[in-house]
Image (spheres, grey):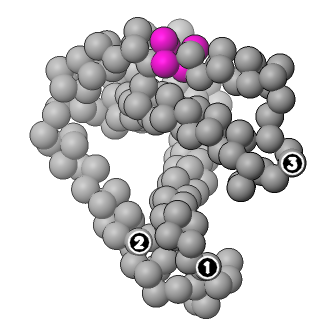
Amino acid sequence: MPAEITELESFMTPGRALTDVLGTWAMLLFLGGTLVAAFNSIIPILWCPAYILHEARSKEIRSSDPRQARRSFKLVFAALCLLSALSPLVHLGLGLSVVDMIVLFPAWNGVFGLPIAAVLLFWAVNDRETMGDRVNGLTQNVANAVLVALSIVLAASSLQDVVGAIVGGGL
């Protein structure tokens, strides 16, 4: 085992293991890749709710160019950015490490967000006003109902473990 690493102690553990095998440049590559991956995840995660809220209010964003977007769109996006900057408070309040947050927050989304999204998509693909003559047929609805039920069952079976890990100080 590289550097005798047997468990994931911190965010830097994978980088240290790579450094032992490939040299010091591997840590820089690891940190650069992590930064790019984080940026690639964070921007769409914060951008999407701003779009969704405007669509739900039947407001046009005007342009994909942020300089020409509506002021309310910019305010929602900025508010979400500020809210996300509070993640260190999650660490302080719940005792979660960066690694815990990286693992548990997507699990939280799976438990709470996925079933809601699945139900809303099921509704949307059967709404004639939204889909016109392209609404789902019987076979698609049966498959979709199975997927919605599966998402709810998986969320219910994981709920206690995910919430327990988050409020209990991590994994």
- 74 w.r.t. 67: above or below: above
Report which residue position mark 3 lands on: 133
Q: Residues within 10 Å of mark 3 (few under 14, many from 20)?
A: few
Q: CA distance from mark 3 to mark 1?
A: 24 Å
Relative vertical location of residue 37 with respect to residue 108 in this rendering, above or below? below
Q: Amino acid at mark 3?
A: Asp
Q: CA distance from mark 2 to mark 3?
A: 34 Å
Give the mark nearer the N terminus: 3 vs 1.
1
Q: Is residue 142 left or right of residue 101?
A: right
Q: Secondary structure at mark 1?
A: loop
Q: Are marks 3 and 1 in contact (CB under 8 Å)?
A: no
Q: Residue at x 67, y 83 (%)?
A: 63
Segment tinted magenta in the rendering = 150-154
- Which image quarter: residue 120? top right
Label 1 crowding class (10 Å Cα cut-off): few <14, some 14-19, many 20+? few
Amino acid type, label 1: Glu
To which residue does mark 2 refer? 76
What is the x, y in percent for residue 155? 44, 18
Q: Nearer the viewer, mark 1 or mark 2?
A: 1
Q: Which residue is mark 1?
A: 60
Q: Residue at x 34, y 57 (%)?
A: 84
Q: CA distance from mark 1 to mark 2?
A: 14 Å
Please determine whether, in this image, residue 114 is positioned above or below residue 34: above
Crowding near pointer 2: few (<14 within 10 Å), some, many (20+)?
some
